Amino acid sequence: MWALILIWAANFSVVKAALIDFEPLAFNAARFVLASALMLVFLRHTGGLPRFKRSEWPVLVGLGLLGNTLYQVLFIFGIDGTLAGNSALILGTVPAYVAVLSSWLGHERLGTKTWVGVALSLVGVALVVWGSARVEFGQATVRGDLLMVAAAIGWSLYTVGSSPLVRRYGALPVTSVTLWIGTVGLVLISVPSLSSQSWTVISWASWAGLLYSGAFSIAVAYLLWYYGVRHMGSTRTALYSNAIPIVALAIAWLTLGETPGWLQLLGAVAIVIGVTLSREKGVKRGDKKGAVAGDHPFSENEGLEALDRRV
């Protein structure tokens, strides 16, 4: 799990550094083609795809475009326009958004701790955005931060929307199919960027960043994630993932020189505490005794098996 934390936490700085040479959409399209190929190899060695119902394919297409095309466009332009540390902290609030969406959809009734956690997470995001604007002396980081907020909401919608299919078929098949669909969408909208990209001026470090972000932060990270869920359970795996934003902030500080201000650090603390509280199990609608294993949005049957693939 600590290997997974390091892989995902470092990915923010890796992507940020690679975008010095790559155009955002060209980078995203290339890394997702690589990730899709690796996922195909992995899936073939784990039993292949189930037969989805014909009526489910429109839903799969919509989820693929939402969770892998739209989300990735928001992510890549967001991280290009703000700090790597900010991106990690803002995306760390996804569990809070998932909890709110689950409540609105009537999946569960959230307890007081969860609502306090959601509020703390949102306060933390506000502190991060405000703090980075002050640290950067008015540079345009706010736009990138807001794109990251939109990306977090988009990924939350994908997580909640994919839950019924994940429960029916498992996370790996659903994630793989939506990944492939989203990759097609990414490549299509990235054709102009791929054509205008100056491929000969890309440094070896940026090529390594593309390889790392496509192979390790997606394909290899999936294997580690499944291993954690299988051997430790979803709750402990989720708690480990809470450390990702903090580790990412530290890596961005050490590698990119993104020295966080005190408002960002305060926001980071608020986000971590808020996300930890928001992962508390809610009460299922109509159940006065409390939630069962599959009720929480980050249980094995829902959020965790939808994969915490936000990077």
Image (tube, grey):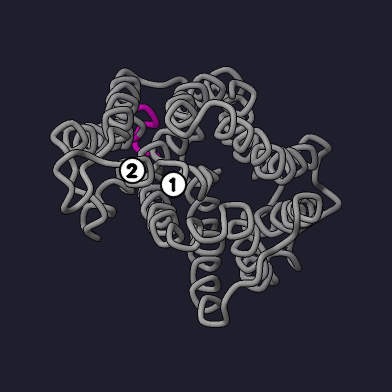
Indicate left or right for 158 with 25 as reference: left
- Quadrant into which the N terminus falls: top right
Residue at horizontal 35%, vertical 39%? 93
Residue at horizontal 66%, vertical 44%? 218
Tell me if I can see residue 130 in this picture.
no
Q: Which residue is mark 2?
A: 296
Give the total number of marks visible in the rendering. 2
Residue at horizontal 31%, vertical 29%? 271
**Was residue 147 drawn as part of the magenta stretch in this picture?**
no
Q: Write down the region rendered in magenta.
A: 133-139
> Mark 1: few, some, or many residues within 10 Å (few <14, many ≥20)?
many
Where residue 214 appears, as percent x and y from the top left, is 71, 46
Indicate left or right for 258 with 266 as reference: right
- Quadrant into which the C terminus falls: top right
Where residue 104 appears, as percent x and y from the top left, is 21, 57
- Which amino acid lies under the numbered mark 2 shown in the image of this protein? His
- Which amino acid lies under the numbered mark 1 shown in the image of this protein? Gly
Which mark is nearer the camera, 1 or 2? Answer: 2
- Looking at marks 1 and 2 on the same chain, the residue that comes earlier in the sequence is marked by 2
- Closest to the observer, 196 or 46: 46
Classify mark 2: helix, strand or loop.
Answer: loop
Where residue 82 appears, as percent x and y from the top left, is 46, 41
Confirm or deny contact between disc 1 and disc 2 (CB under 8 A).
yes
Disc ID at residue 303: 1
